[in-house]
Image: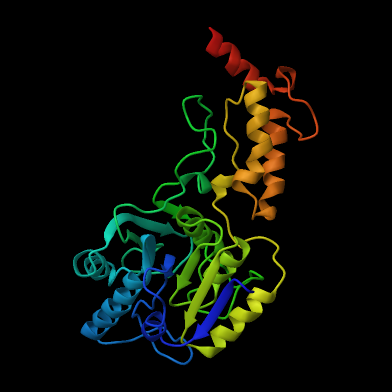
Amino acid sequence: MDNIDIVCGDAIKELAKLESNSVDLIIADPPYNLGKDYGNNHDLKGFDEYLDFTNKWLSEAKRVLKNEGTIYVFMGVRFISYLYNILETEQKLYFNSWICWHYTQGLGKTKGFSPRHDDILMFTKSKKFNFYLDNIRIPQKYYRSRNNMRGANPGDVWLFSHVHYCNENRQKHPTQKPEELIERMVLASTTKGDYVVDPFSGSGTTLRVCQQLERRGLGIELNPEYVNSTKKRLSQKFTGFDSIDERMSRIPNDLNDPKIREEYLKNHEKWFLSNHPDALEKFHQEAKEKYNYSPNLPQTDKELPLFASINERIKET
């Protein structure tokens, strides 16, 4: 774990120890001030006290962020508008995206609509910032020569399941985030060797992702029990991230040119599934069914399934 470190302490005090303009990416999942129990502390401050706390840690976060750096901040619905105002108006950061993390299970209501999303605000320190779109593209629904073969922008609505309690990677933390959610942020905003800081490390998801993606990572966590569990998590064998955008396994329709088809299919695993071995079987099955594709066989027009051959003839007419 030479490239990964976790310290037990207060986020504001520990951020203050970091050198200015030294961090490439900050991923922050602060307490939402909803009264959750985090073991040695309770997430329930007065309204003004919470906003003051938010402003102070964000001030330190801005200071340590490089000019080309990015910050992603999770927040619940009650304080999301106040957080936006602090980031833009008080900290003078630059708004980029308001991401909606949509999940399928959550708190149930009998009066009103049950919440099924969290908000993530993406801000940058300057107008010139690092963003690596090719690292996070998703497969197209249909292949078109005018489109990028590498795939499409994933958009600002992200569908990932919660890390369910039956998942072997589930930690004893009330707000654990899925690894692929963090993977997308890390891949989008950093390259190998870049420095990523999580001021509210919690279950250690950001550090686990940084460890596998060869980024330098620092986690700050107030609860020593979570620090210890994170260290244990980082020492465990990696078998793949615990979640995935289901679109990553899909294969575009209309890959009718045999050369283009083979080039695309032989790169699909590298582009989209390199950290997701659990998704390989689904990809191989779809490739076989849709294009009779096997990595060890030459690809010719004769291997196209009937529906693809029909589509090709329709286009010719």
Q: For the point 48% across and 83% down, which residue is it? A: 221
Q: How is the image coloured?
A: rainbow
Figure check: 246 above or below 265: below
Q: Count numbered badges in the picture.
A: 0
Q: Name, please, the residue furthest toward the bottom.
A: 40
Q: Quadrant of residue 229?
A: bottom right
Q: Looking at the image, which is closer to me, 211 or 191?
A: 191
| Residue 191: % across, % down | 52, 56
What residue appears at the point 66 percent right and 44 percent down from the top-left corner? 269
Residue 61 image point, x, y percent: 35, 73
Compared with 61, 37 (above or below) is below
In the picture as drawn, the residue positioned furthest to the left comes out as: 89
131 relative to 234 in the view: left or right: left
Image coords of residue 163 (percent x, y)? 56, 67
Q: Position of residue 305 (x, y in %)?
A: 69, 23
Say whether residue 65 is left or right of residue 288: left
**Which residue is outermost to the top?**
317
Q: Is residue 119 visible?
A: no
Residue at x 44% of width, y 77% of height: 200
Residue at image position (56%, 65%) is 210
Residue 259, visible in the rendered structure:
yes
Quarter of the figure with residue 313: top right
Nearer the observer, 54 or 34: 54
Figure check: 229 above or below 179: below
Q: Quadrant of the N terminus?
A: bottom right
